[in-house]
Amino acid sequence: MFPENTSHRPAEQAVTIHQPAPIAPYPAAPVLPVQPAGVPSVTSIVLPDGRVLTGYAIDHHQPEPVTAKPLVSRTAVNIALGGIGFGAVCGGLVLLTTFIAALAALVQQLIILAAVIFGGFIAVQVLTAGRERGATTVNIRKAVFKRNHFHG
């Protein structure tokens, strides 16, 4: 269905083999031959085109498991807790100011009540004092003030 790519074919490609270059040792460290602890096993793989690759099996390095990160960062948790604390403090301050205002209103009403009761008591004492002791009745007549002088 699609035209075949004729620019190159897998069989026509030149096979190049790259040999790894040995790493030069650190100059200060002496080079000592080290015998491997065990001979690794040789593995052969047959490719689909019939070629056979033979080499040593390499144990893959297993990375250390990564510790799972929490779903929410610690900074976000601290900010949220700070906001909740701030809201609680503000609510407490609102309640405190409301309590102080209510207490001030109560004290003001108690002072007014005491003034009314005490004033009523004084008025009753003054008005009933003349009747109980047999005081004389004083008639007040018209007084005339002429040129800042009293003429009775």
Image (cartoon, helix red, strand yellow):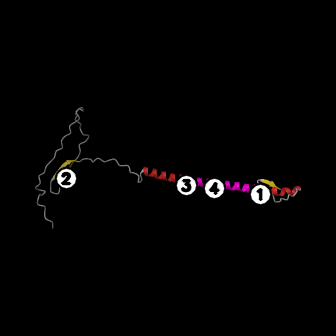
Marks 2/4: CA–CA distance: 91 Å
Residue found 18% across the figure and 49% down from its top: 54
Q: Which image quadrant is residue 151 in?
A: bottom right
At label 1, the amino acid type is: Gly
Q: Is residue 125 visible?
A: no
Residue 138 within the magenta-colored segment of the rendering: no
| Earlier residue among tags 2 and 3 | 2
Q: Is residue 28 above or below residue 68?
A: above
Foreground: disc 2 or disc 3 = 3
Marks 2/3: CA–CA distance: 75 Å
Picture disc at residue 120: 1
Q: Foreground: 90 or 136? A: 136
| Earlier residue among tags 3 and 1 | 3
Taking 133 as reference, is 34 left or right?
left
Q: How many marks?
A: 4
Marks 3/1: CA–CA distance: 43 Å
Residue found 77% across the figure and 57% down from its top: 120
Q: Tell me the SS state at disc 3.
A: helix
Q: Which residue is mark 3?
A: 91
Taking 119 as reference, is 55 left or right?
left
Magenta highlight range: 93-118
Q: Which residue is mark 2?
A: 45
Q: Tell me the SS state at disc 2.
A: strand
Q: Tell me the SS state at disc 4.
A: helix
Residue with the most extreme bottom position: 1
Q: Which residue is mark 4?
A: 102
At label 3, the amino acid type is: Gly
Foreground: disc 3 or disc 1 = 1
Residue found 54% across the figure and 53% down from its top: 90
